Structure formats: structure tokens, C-alpha cells
Amino acid sequence: MNSVAVEGCNPEGELALVVRAQHGDLRAFEKLYRAYVDRIYGLCMRLVRNTATAEDCTQQAFVNAWTALPEFKARSSFGTWVHRIAANVALSDRRKVVRVSQGPLPEQESSGPVIFDTPMEVHDIEAAIQALPDGARDVLILCGIYGFSHAEVATMLGIAEGTCRAQLHRARELLRGRLHLEGN
């Protein structure tokens, strides 16, 4: 996953912000927050499909990141790390809702637009993604849109890596079929 430019900083500038934040510099963490909050919210929104819940998950992801920041070892970019935290928060929240309700999920709101290089309407593509079964949609969002590896997504979702690959293939086939049918 590519790192977002932090106020024009290169990856070394981002790392410097992380180090300062690890030493308690709230302004440095705020810069990291501002650089990633929109993308984190977009990820949460696509996973939980509810504005208020996505906002809560975004906030919780950054609280978790701040708390875990002393253990961050920079084996990946800060952006990859905080995206993984956010995905785990959103997926955990969604599992909690399913366990508590033991019924259908509450009415879902559509998420913000995804930018594709295609002549189709963005809302048609977004609606087709949201109509996918949960497992296929989650893998498509995490692998196909946000760029996580199959291994990372498999760990986040608690599935085998082969299942992740199969779900991504299934999601692409279902999406291709839905978009092809809508285009005729």
C-alpha cells in the first residue's frame, strides 16, 4: 500500500513524525492523523456501511494507533499500519453487531464514491460492490481497493489465504457480471 504524502514529506519525513509522536509529540501525531483520516474513514465506511459507525471506527482506529504507537517498529509504513488497525476495528465492530442483534444488520448507508477509470457511473459501481456477499465484498475492498496482500487480509478476516484468493476471484466475477448486466 502506498504511503500518503504528509504535508509533502517523503517517507523519511513521515518516519520522523512517527518518532516524534512516539515520544509524546501530539502535533506530530496530529499531522499523521490529518494525512490519513479521510482514507481511514473511507475504509471503515466501506466495511461497516453506516456513517455514524464508520466515524466511531475511524476515531477508535486512531485511539488504538496512539496507544500502540510505542510498539510500532516501522516494518511497514505508518499508513499501512493504521489501515490494518482500522480494518480490524471495523471488522470487529461489525462482528459485534451481528452477535448482539442475531438478526439482519440495520439498514446500511452507501459509502462515498470510489474513483475508477471507466465510463460507468460511479454510483453504479459502488452499488454493485455493496451488493456483493460480505466475504467477497470485504476481500475486494481490502485487497482490490486498499491494496492489502492476501496474507494480510486473510489474517484480518480470520480466513485461509487460499480462501482470500478465492473470495477475491468470486468478487471480481460477481462484480463483472453485475456491471456487464447493468451496462446492457
Image (spheres, grey):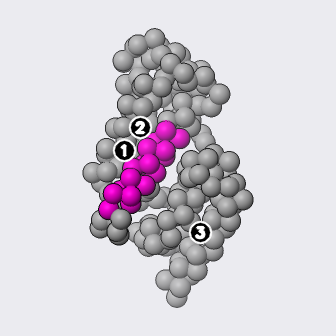
Can you identify the residue that label 1 sits on?
Answer: 57
Q: Residue furthest bottom?
A: 184
Query: Is residue 89 shown in magenta?
Result: yes
Q: Which mark is residue 171?
A: 3
* Residue density around tag 1, few if under 14, some if 14–19, many if 20 or more, within 10 Å: many
Label 2, label 3: how far apart the Cα atoms are: 26 Å
Do callouts 3 and 1 mark residues in contact (Cβ within 8 Å)? no
Q: Is residue 145 magenta?
A: no
* Labels 2 & 1 near each other (Cβ < 8 A): yes
Residue of label 2: 61
Identify residue type, mark 1. Answer: Cys
Quadrant of the frame with the N terminus: top right
Q: Answer above or below: position of 42 versus 178.
A: above
* N-terminal-most mark, 2 or 3: 2
Q: Which residues are magenta?
A: 83-101
Q: Residues within 10 Å of mark 2 (few under 14, many from 20)?
A: many
Give the amino acid at mark 3.
Ala
Please rate how many residues cluster around mark 3, counting C-alpha atoms within 10 Å: few if below 14, some from 14 to 19, many from 20.
many
Which of 101 and 85 lies nearest the eye of the viewer?
101
Whether residue 164 is visible to the viewer of this picture, yes or no, is yes
Which of the pair 19/53 is nearer the observer? 53
Residue situated furthest right in the rendering: 162
Which residue is painted at 56% across and 73% down in the image?
175
Q: Where in the figure is residue 47, as x and y percent of width and height?
A: 44, 56
Secondary structure character of the magenta stretch overall: helix
